[in-house]
Amino acid sequence: MRAWVVDRPGPVERKPLRFVERPVPVPAADELLVHVRACGVCRTDLHVTEGDLPVRRPGVTPGHEVVGEVAALGAEAGGWAVGDRVGAAWLRRTDGTCKYCRRGSENLCPDSEYTGWTADGGYAEYTTVPAAFAYRLPAGVDDVALAPLLCAGIIGYRALLRTSLPEGGRLGLYGFGGSAHLCAQVALAQGATVHVLTRDEASRRLALGLGCASAAGAQDVPPEPLDGAILFAPVGDLVPVALRALDRGGVLALAGIHLTDVPVLHYESELFYEKELRSVTSNTRQDGREFLELAARYGVRATTHPYPLSEAQRALQDLKAGRFDGAAVLVNDL
């Protein structure tokens, strides 16, 4: 099979990915072999490729928003059949026994594994996924539209939960890419007023088209105080900006796995009045199941830009340069 590998992490402009021929992987006893149909291009893939995240598997195949078809099953992989439509996401495996797993916080498991970082992912013709961590996907939505839901959607949903947004609350979204535009649709469907703050003009137009109340520059002040906010842009300088925009008791959730350094925070103007700053770490499988059910109920749809699998490197370059709104998706053209 053909697959992309991170040959030597570095700026995507220097083409750190290499397109190689590899054997089709053999699923472990508890795993499914997945014939990949589509794989979303997530900013985390960019962090893996450029080395913002430390190398956990040399020569890894990125990609963790995988939509495909079960091609084979390991001896102990029950509940699935060859030909089933299946999704694989970022959280690949946990130990199931640590104190975090036992209390329902498997996203904090110290021994967790991740698709496209600690194990090969979906920038390939085939990949594997533990059967217990695979997702059943809703009918009636095509592969390309589904792919971004499997990380951008799930993580955006967990970030929304972390804001503890009150009913009918005012939500600010800083950055408006693949994850934020899906999160916005859930928040709007649940009755929130959504204000978007992003540097990209095309993304501001998309936000207004989805029904957001306002769309302005990332450093601008929203038209009203916010009950909650989510920082999707990996820019630490925006943390104090977003904190100042919060109303009393508001919560800022940091949605990214990577963030540049946060500047010194001023207590009185940015943290006083019981404002809170929370991080987001991966997701639980329950988050994923809840989000996919809500996405089907609310008709959440990704704005997508398909690329052939053979052009994965260009898709990452375009992501970094901000050349598209919504999300890029690799389509298996081989």
Image: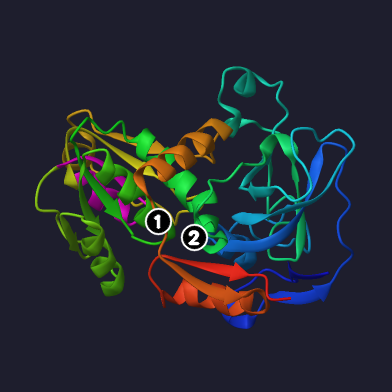
Residue 240 shown in magenta: yes
Q: Position of residue 312 (x, y in %)?
A: 62, 74
Q: Residue furthest front?
A: 140
Q: Is residue 2 above or below residue 101?
A: below
Query: Mark 1 near mark 2, Cβ–Cβ under 8 Å?
Result: yes
Q: Which mark is residue 144?
A: none
Q: Quadrant of residue 203?
A: bottom left
Return the residue at label 1.
301
First-in-chain label (1 vs 2): 2
Q: Quadrant of residue 237?
A: bottom left
Q: Position of residue 291 (x, y in %)?
A: 45, 39
* Magenta span of residues: 226-244
Q: Is residue 89 left or right of residue 213?
A: right
At x 73%, y 62%, the residue is 61
Residue placed most toward the observer, 237 or 296: 296
Q: Residues within 10 Å of mark 1 (few under 14, many from 20)?
A: some
Q: Residues within 10 Å of mark 2 (few under 14, many from 20)?
A: many
Q: Position of residue 17 (x, y in %)?
A: 69, 74
Q: Is residue 332 left or right of residue 43?
A: right
Q: Quadrant of residue 214?
A: bottom left
Amino acid on which the number 2 mark rests in the picture? Ala
Residue placed most toward the observer, 95 or 328: 328
Residue 47 shown in magenta: no
Return the residue at label 2.
145
Between the residue at mark 1 and the residue at mark 2, the CA separation in whole angstroms equals 7 Å
